[in-house]
Image (cartoon, rainbow, N blue to C red):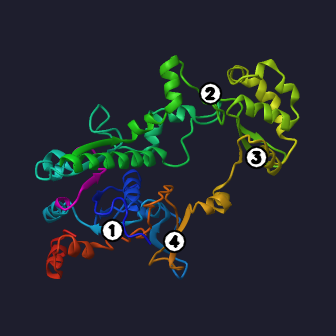
C-alpha cells in the first residue's frame, strides 16, 4: 500500500455543491488532496436529496444518501459551517488561512457579499489558489445568471448537433457540461499550484459551464469556423468520417466506426459487398462523405445478414473498429470494464450491506495511482474531527461554536 499520493499535503476548502465543483474536488481528493467539504448545517449539498435511488439501510429503507450525491463526493471530509453567521465567516477564514485552494460555485458576487470574494481576501491570503465555478463566468452580460448544465448545452450549441436529423435537439444523457467544467477546473488548479509553488503567488481561476461546453465543440466548432457552414444534427453519423454510425443487425445493433480506406475495403470483403468496394463513389473517405446517403442506403442489407455477436467477432478479426451498444448493466458486466476496475466498492456506515458501489477513477498512474480512502461523507460527519485537527480547537471551543450557530 503506497503511503504518498501526488497531492498529499494539499488542502482544499471546498465551497461547492451539485456536480461541477464536487467532480473537481473528488478528482483532487482521489489524487491525495485533503478536501474539506463545507455544507450548510441541517441541509447540506442539494444533491443529497436528489433521489431515488438512495442507499438502503439494513431494513431496506431509504437513507439520506442519494446515488447522485455519492457519485461525486468520495475522499472528502464534511464540515458544517453556517456562512450566514459572523462566527461562521470567521471560522471559514481560519480554514482558508490553512488551505492551499478555495473552490466555490456561488453566483457571481455571492461570496463577496460575505466578505469572502477573491478581492476581499487576496491580500490577506496571497498564497491562495481561488477557483470560481459558475454558469457563465465572472464577466460578460450573462454573468449574473444562474447556471445549469442543460442551459449551457443549449446556449453552447452541443444540442444543435445532437439527436436525429428530423427530431428535436437532444441534450447529452448526463450533465456533461458540469462534469467537464470540473475536469477543466482541476487542471487549472494544478497549474495554479505549480505557479504558486514556484513564485509564492496565488491567483483567481474563472471557470464556467458555457466556456467549457464551447471548448468541446472541438471539430464541429472548428468545422464551422473554417467553412462558415452551420453543422446540422446527424444522429449517430460523423461529419468527417463515413461509414461511422449504428447499424441494425439480425438481432440488435452494432457501431461500425470505419476510420480509413483500408478498413472500409476490409469491411466490404468481410460483408461480401464487393460491389461497394469496387464502386468509385466510395473509394476514399472524402468520396464516401460526398455520397454518404447512397452508401447508407446500401449498407443496412449487408449488416442485417449477421447477428451482433457475429459482426463483433468478424470485425475484430479483420481489425475494423466495431462495438455493441451496451446498456448500463451491460457496461458494468463487461469483462474489460471489470478488469479496468471501473466499478469499486467502499465501506459506508449507513448502507445495510456495509458497502456502496461507486464508479472508479479512470486515471491509471504507475507510481501514484488514485486511492479510495474515504467514502462520501454523511452531513457534518467530520466537523469535530477537522476543527480539532486543523484549527486545534478543544471540545469547549467547538461547543461554543455550536451554541453560536456557526456549525
For mark 1, give the secondary structure: strand
Question: Which mark sits nearer the N-terminus, 4 or 2?
Answer: 2
Does residue 278 show up magenta in the picture? Answer: no
- Residue at 49%, 77% (x, y): give it: 351
In the rendered image, residue 403, in percent from the top left (x then y), is placed at 16, 75
* Residue found at the far front of this picture: 367
In front: label 2 or label 3: 3
Question: Which mark sits nearer the N-terminus, 2 or 1?
Answer: 1
Question: Which mark sits nearer the N-terminus, 2 or 3?
Answer: 2
In front: label 2 or label 1: 2
Q: Residues within 10 Å of mark 1 (few under 14, many from 20)?
A: many
Tell me, for residue 356, which label it has, or none.
Answer: 4
Nearest the viewer among 111 and 337 is 337
Q: Which residue is mark 2?
A: 240
Q: CA distance from mark 4 to mark 3?
A: 36 Å
Region in magenta: 96-110
Q: CA distance from mark 4 to mark 1?
A: 17 Å
In the rendered image, residue 115, in percent from the top left (x then y), is placed at 14, 52
Q: Which residue is mark 1?
A: 77
Q: Which residue is mark 3?
A: 316
Amino acid at each position: 500500500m503506497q503511503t504518498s499520493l501526488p497531492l498529499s499535503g494539499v488542502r482544499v476548502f471546498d465551497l461547492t455543491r451539485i456536480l461541477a465543483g464536487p467532480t473537481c474536488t473528488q478528482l483532487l481528493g482521489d489524487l491525495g488532496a485533503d478536501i474539506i467539504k463545507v455544507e450548510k448545517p441541517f441541509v447540506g449539498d442539494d444533491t443529497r436529496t436528489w433521489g431515488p435511488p438512495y442507499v438502503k439501510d439494513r431494513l431496506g429503507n431509504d437513507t439520506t444518501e442519494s446515488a447522485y450525491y455519492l457519485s461525486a463526493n468520495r475522499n472528502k471530509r464534511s464540515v458544517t459551517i453556517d456562512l450566514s453567521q459572523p462566527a461562521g465567516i470567521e471560522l471559514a477564514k481560519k480554514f482558508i488561512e490553512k488551505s492551499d485552494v478555495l473552490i466555490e460555485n456561488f453566483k457571481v458576487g455571492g461570496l463577496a457579499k460575505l466578505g469572502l470574494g477573491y478581492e476581499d481576501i487576496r491580500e490577506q491570503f496571497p498564497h491562495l489558489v481561488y477557483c470560481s465555478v459558475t454558469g457563465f463566468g465572472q464577466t460578460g452580460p450573462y454573468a449574473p445568471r444562474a447556471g445549469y448544465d442543460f442551459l449551457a448545452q443549449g446556449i453552447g450549441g452541443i444540442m444543435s448537433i445532437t439527436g436525429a436529423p428530423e427530431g428535436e435537439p437532444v441534450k447529452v444523457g448526463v450533465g456533461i457540461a458540469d462534469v467537464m467544467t470540473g475536469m477543466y477546473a482541476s487542471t487549472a488548479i494544478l497549474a495554479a499550484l505549480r505557479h504558486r509553488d514556484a513564485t509564492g503567488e496565488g491567483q483567481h481561476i474563472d471557470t464556467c459551464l458555457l466556456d467549457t461546453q464551447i471548448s468541446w465543440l472541438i471539430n464541429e466548432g472548428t468545422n464551422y469556423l473554417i467553412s462558415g457552414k452551420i453543422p446540422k444534427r446527424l444522429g449517430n453519423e460523423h461529419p468527417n468520417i463515413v461509414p461511422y454510425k449504428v447499424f441494425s443487425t439480425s438481432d440488435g445493433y452494432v457501431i461500425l466506426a470505419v476510420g480509413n480506406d483500408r478498413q472500409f475495403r476490409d469491411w466490404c470483403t468481410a460483408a461480401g459487398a464487393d460491389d461497394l468496394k469496387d464502386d468509385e463513389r466510395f473509394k476514399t473517405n472524402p468520396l464516401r462523405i460526398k455520397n454518404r446517403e447512397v452508401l447508407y442506403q446500401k449498407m443496412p442489407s449487408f449488416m442485417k445478414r449477421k447477428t451482433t455477436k457475429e459482426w463483433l467477432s468478424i470485425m475484430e478479426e479483420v481489425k475494423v473498429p466495431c462495438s455493441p451498444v451496451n446498456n448500463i448493466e451491460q457496461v458494468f458486466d463487461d469483462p474489460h470494464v471489470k478488469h479496468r476496475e471501473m466499478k469499486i466498492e467502499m465501506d459506508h456506515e449507513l448502507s445495510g450491506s456495509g458497502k456502496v458501489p461507486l464508479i472508479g477513477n479512470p486515471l491509471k498512474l504507475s507510481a501514484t495511482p488514485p486511492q479510495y480512502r474515504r467514502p462520501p461523507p454523511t452531513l457534518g460527519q467530520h466537523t469535530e474531527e477537522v476543527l480539532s485537527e486543523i484549527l486545534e480547537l478543544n471540545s469547549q471551543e467547538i461547543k461554543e461554536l455550536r451554541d453560536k450557530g456557526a456549525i
